[in-house]
Amino acid sequence: MKFAVIVFPGSNCDLDMYHAVKDALGEEADYVFHTETSLEGYDSVLLPGGFSYGDYLRCGAIAQFSPIMEEVKRFAAEGKTVLGVCNGFQILVEAGLLPGVLHRNTGLKFMCRTVELKVENNETRFTSDYAAQETITIPIAHGEGNYYCDDATYAMLQTNRQIAFTYADNPNGSRGDIAGITNKAGNVLGMMPHPERAVELLTGGTDGLKLFTSLVKQGAHHVKTTV
């Protein structure tokens, strides 16, 4: 597969994303800047963490208007995979590709540590290499990771099995302990924890690697069955 790592002004996890795909997986990857208007030739899009546009207004609120985001929306509408991590999750929400909103953490402090997640749905393109209800350890680094949605949206997320990951011990106040959700079609995932920082033992663990191997396997299957 060929991955596009989107780079916004203020992105700081683009290098981690690139390393996870290029070095840990051995797949093709390119940096694609926010000013670009084409994702032709790519199989999957990665929106990394960081502080796009300095996190002015709300996190992700300015980045959603970047030229590349119209192409990301088209890409997602075609059923191709899009992963947004941390600030990337915030951008996907602001762009309307995922429901809900992300608030300040309940403690009003930036958090940077590892947490345990539960794999709530291992039948998505992003989680198929995990076991059902598997517990994994993934780093977090965010100040606005408190996911919120209204009752109707929460019921929809549960009914459609769109909740991919939950926190074992909720660090930020997210509704229903939500750490990551997909869109209804299942080809867009947003999550606050950083799987790209957990792909090597050297950096503390490899629990994030299965997300990327899932993406490669499921993405290849999807391309094969839809050509």
Image: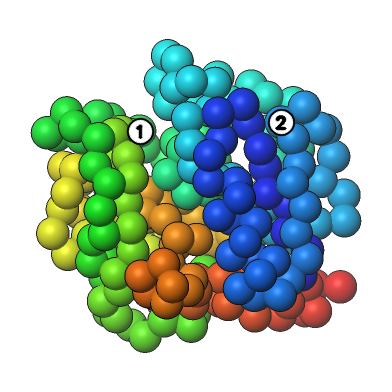
Between 222 and 201, the one nearer to me in the picture: 201
Q: Which of the 4 quarters of the picture holds residue 220?
A: bottom right
Q: Residue at x 62, y 61 (%)?
A: 19
- Name the disc covering residue 101, or none: 1
Q: Quadrant of residue 146?
A: top left
Residue shown at the point (65%, 65%) measured from the top left = 21
Asked if residue 117 lies left or right of residue 86, the reply is left
Q: Around disc 1, counting alpha carbons within 10 Å, would you say few (fewer than 14), some (14 to 19), or many (20 or more)?
A: some
CA neighbours of label 2 inside 10 A, class few (<14), some (14 to 19), many (20+): some
Q: Position of residue 165 (x, y in %)?
A: 33, 63
The residue that appears at 17% across and 49% down in the rendered structure is 171
Which amino acid type corresponds to the residue marked 2 in the rendered image?
His
Which image quadrant for residue 27?
bottom right
Q: In which quadrant is the C terminus drawn?
A: bottom right
Q: Is residue 195 visible?
A: yes
Seen from the viewer's position, the closer of residues 51 and 227 is 51
Does residue 34 lie above or below 185 as drawn? above
Q: Alpha carbon of mark 1 to alpha carbon of mark 2: how far?
A: 22 Å
SS label for mark 2: loop
Label tally: 2
Instruction: Relative to 164, say whether 62 is above or below.
Output: above
Residue at mark 2: 34
Of labels 1 and 2, earlier in sequence is 2
Q: Amino acid at mark 1?
A: Val
Query: Residue 5, relative to residue 199: is it above or below?
Result: above
State whether residue 96 appears in this view: no
Figure quadrant of the N terminus: bottom right
Residue lying at 25% horizontally and 53% vertically, measured from the top left: 113
- Left of 141 or right of it: where is 211? right
Q: Nearer the viewer, mark 1 or mark 2?
A: 2
Query: Could you say which disc has been placed on residue 76 in the image?
Result: none
Observer-nearest of 151 and 55: 55
